[in-house]
Each structure stands twice: as structure tokens, then as C-alpha cells.
Image (cartoon, rainbow, N blue to C red):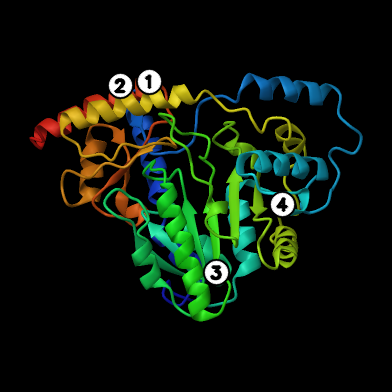
């Protein structure tokens, strides 16, 4: 009879190890479920998940009803793996208006959300051992996405205000570098990268291309690009580097995270663009996505200039930022997305998060984003959750004598 130490593994060791490392976001979700079962849902103040509760705009609901009542023939069949031509053309026209660049439908691949787009891009570009630079703090899935396709992650810290540091990126380049992932507006900090910094990053990549004699790609993850405040403009990464791919979704600006609809756009002046786009279409198929959801493709082509109420998020940002800074917490003011990333008042961010749990307040430690000493707050929640959470933050601040 086999003992536990000799029993064959039921799953891949690599996956087992990744699961053991785990996502802090998922752990906090599970802790939240435990606390809610014990104290009641209204007594737990969960700021851990970036899952918007804001409903989609009325224009989406109206269009959904129209399409449901008068579907076009063949709407639910397979289509080209890149997506419906009409939808890709609509996205290309939108990108033309935004950037002034000559995008066409041939530059766009409809995908299963931004996560699907990132995996398609990495599958298309990476050989085993190729390096992908990611900036810390980072979205926790990036290392797994790179690993999915044989990539090796090189982590480069951002500066004190969470802006990319071009010199650090330059120093991280090696003969194996293949891509850099940017994310602005940024998860978990809410920071929007400045135009000079984005341009400088593009210059670093072109320096790397000249030095190592191989193409280097800028992959920009932009699901929060329309959630910005105070008149801030998100600089176009397409102006920074010709070998740029943008992965985005409608999960946040239309509050459709569960519908898994997004797209990947390749710079119209990208060298070898046709080969890159063909590789992305092939990857979309062989990764099992096949094509982006057909119904959502029909809907979003008419909603490219529509968003949820941005003021709803800005009100929550202002409320939390003002209250926390008055309590003595140190926070870089976010300019977009729906997150804050305060500094932990004690060196051990995990211990601080556990202290907040005693107040039934749930946040995610910065360690989960590759940046210990901070914690993430997601404010895409009802006002009552913020109200209750601030009481917990206040009690902890008093206990730690922050003021």
C-alpha cells in the first residue's frame, strides 16, 4: 500500500507549486467568505476584489434587448478566429480617432478579455527561455501568463511614485529579452504613467533592439484606460514604440467582466505586422479561445465611446484618499482605475492585513503584487462597505498612533 510520501501526484508539480504560492486576492476572497458566514455579510467590509458592482450602462442593456429580439442570422455561429469583421473595423476606427494612426480591421484581434489578449500575445511572441520584463508592483497573474508560454519573468521595481524607471529597465535588458508589459492606469496603484516616461520606455526598447539585434515588444495592458479622473489623459503607448501591442477589455469601462470580451491591437506600423497578427490569430485558436464571444462582439462594436459613470468611482477615490491620509496613512493619490495602494504602517504588510481582518476589513497585502510594505484597496464597492471599512482603519490607526 502506498503511503502519502510515495503516492503519485494527481496534478502537474508545476501547477501544484503555483497553487501553493497562490493568489493573495483569492485567499482574501476565501477569508471574506469565512468571516461573512460567521458575522453576516453586512458586518464584513471587503475591499479585496477588483470586481465592479456598478451595473453596465443603460445603452448596453437597451442594445442587448434589441439584439435579443431581432438577432441577425448566423450571429451565434463560428466566425473567423480574429472575430467579426464589422467589430474589428469598428475598433480600428475608434483607435484611429484616438491615436491618429491608420488602424484597419486587419490590425485587431477580438479576444476573451484582456487576460485572453495577453496570453495570445505572449503565445505568439515567446520562445522557451525568452524573458518578459514586468514592473513591480504587478498584477499577480502576469508571471503565470508568461510561464504559460515558456517565458521567464524579470521583475523591475518602479520608482517611489510607482512610475516606470527607464534606467532600471535598461539595466534589466539581456540578449533573451523579448517583451515588456506595461499597465496604465495601473493595478494595484491607480497610477497613470506620464507621457515622458512612456516615451522613455520606448527609447529603452529601441536601444535594446539595436544592442541585441532582435525585436523587442511593448505589450500594454489597458482595461482601465477609460477610468481616469481630474482630466488626466492616458498617453498612447503607440506613440512610444512601433512594436507595440495593446491588450484591453470592456470589463471595467462597461462593467462586463463576466462576459470576457476584449481585443488585441497591433501597431499599424509594426515591422513584420502581418506575421505578428497571423501568429496572434493562430494563438487565439490553439489556446482554446477559438474566438471571442459572438454576442458581445455584436454589442460592443456600437458602444466603443460609452462608459459607466466615472464620477461614481471618483467619489469613492476622493472619500477614501482624504479619510485615510487624514488618519495618517501614506498613499500615492491614484489618477485612474479603482484601487489605492497605501504604505503599510508597520513593516510587515501581511501582519497589518491580518490586523485589519480583526476589524473585519479585507484588503490585499502588497506582497501579493511583488511589493511588500504596502496593501491594496479596491473601492468598486457600495458606500456602506467603505463606511464600515473606514471605521476599522480608524481604530487601527489609533492603536498604532499614526497621528
Q: Residue at x 81, y 44 (%)?
A: 84
Q: Crowding at label 2, few (<14), some or many (≥20) Cα neighbours within 10 Å? A: few
Q: Assess whether mark 1 and mark 2 are in contact (beta carbons under 8 angstroms).
A: yes
10 Å neighbourhood of mark 3: few (<14), some, or many (≥20)? Answer: many
In this rendering, the label closer to the viewer, 3 or 4:
3
Query: Which quadrant would residue 43 be assigned to in this image?
Result: top left
Q: Position of residue 41 (x, y in %)?
A: 39, 26
**Residue 182 locus on image (x, y percent):** 47, 55
The residue where tag 4 is placed is 109
Q: Residue at x 43, y 71 (%)?
A: 4
Kindly identify which residue carries mark 2. 387
User: Label 3: which residue?
Assistant: 216
Q: Earlier in the sequence, mark 1 or mark 3?
A: 3
- Which residue, given by chain and number where applicable, does mark 1 sit on? 383
Residue 63 shown left or right of residue 399 in the figure: right
Name above or below for residue 85 compared with residue 198: above
Inter-mark Cα distance, 4 to 2: 42 Å
Of labels 1 and 4, the one closer to you:
4
Amino acid at each position: 500500500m502506498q503511503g502519502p510520501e510515495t503516492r503519485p501526484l494527481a496534478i502537474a508539480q508545476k501547477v501544484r507549486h503555483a497553487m501553493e504560492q497562490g493568489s493573495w486576492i483569492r485567499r482574501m476572497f476565501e477569508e471574506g467568505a469565512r468571516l461573512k458566514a460567521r458575522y453576516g455579510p453586512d458586518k464584513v467590509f471587503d475591499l479585496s476584489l477588483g470586481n465592479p458592482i456598478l451595473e453596465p450602462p443603460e445603452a448596453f442593456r437597451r442594445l442587448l434587448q434589441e439584439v435579443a429580439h431581432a438577432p441577425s442570422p448566423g450571429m451565434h455561429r463560428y466566425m473567423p478566429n480574429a472575430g467579426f469583421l464589422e467589430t474589428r473595423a469598428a475598433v480600428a476606427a475608434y483607435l484611429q480617432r484616438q491615436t491618429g494612426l491608420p488602424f484597419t480591421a486587419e490590425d485587431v484581434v477580438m479576444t476573451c478579455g484582456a487576460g485572453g489578449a495577453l496570453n495570445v500575445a505572449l503565445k505568439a511572441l515567446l520562445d522557451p527561455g525568452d524573458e518578459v520584463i514586468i514592473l513591480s508592483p504587478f498584477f499577480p497573474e502576469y508571471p503565470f501568463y508568461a510561464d504559460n508560454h515558456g517565458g521567464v519573468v524579470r521583475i523591475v521595481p518602479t520608482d517611489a511614485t510607482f512610475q516606470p524607471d527607464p534606467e532600471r529597465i535598461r539595466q534589466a535588458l539581456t540578449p533573451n529579452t523579448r517583451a515588456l508589459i506595461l499597465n496604465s492606469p495601473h493595478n494595484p496603484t491607480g497610477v497613470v504613467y506620464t507621457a515622458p516616461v512612456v516615451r522613455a520606455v520606448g527609447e529603452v526598447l529601441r536601444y535594446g533592439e539595436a544592442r541585441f539585434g532582435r525585436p523587442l515588444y511593448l505589450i500594454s495592458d489597458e482595461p482601465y484606460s477609460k477610468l481616469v479622473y481630474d482630466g488626466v489623459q492616458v498617453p498612447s503607448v503607440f506613440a512610444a514604440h512601433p512594436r507595440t501591442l495593446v491588450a484591453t477589455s470592456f470589463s471595467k469601462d462597461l462593467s462586463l467582466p463576466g462576459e470576457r470580451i476584449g481585443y488585441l491591437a497591433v501597431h499599424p506600423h509594426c515591422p513584420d505586422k502581418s506575421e505578428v497578427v497571423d501568429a496572434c490569430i493562430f494563438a487565439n485558436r490553439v489556446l482554446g479561445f477559438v474566438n471571442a464571444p459572438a454576442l458581445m462582439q455584436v454589442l460592443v462594436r456600437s458602444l466603443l465611446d460609452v462608459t459607466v459613470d466615472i464620477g461614481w468611482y471618483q467619489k469613492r477615490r476622493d472619500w477614501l484618499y482624504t479619510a485615510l491620509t487624514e488618519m495618517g496613512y501614506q498613499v500615492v493619490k491614484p489618477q485612474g482605475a479603482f484601487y489605492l495602494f497605501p504604505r503599510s504602517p508597520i513593516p510587515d504588510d501581511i501582519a497589518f492585513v491580518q490586523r485589519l481582518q480583526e476589524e473585519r476589513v479585507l484588503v490585499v497585502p502588497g506582497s501579493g503584487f511583488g511589493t511588500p510594505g504596502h496593501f491594496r484597496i479596491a473601492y468598486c464597492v457600495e458606500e456602506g462597505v467603505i463606511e464600515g471599512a473606514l471605521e476599522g482603519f480608524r481604530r487601527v490607526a489609533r492603536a498604532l498612533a499614526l497621528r
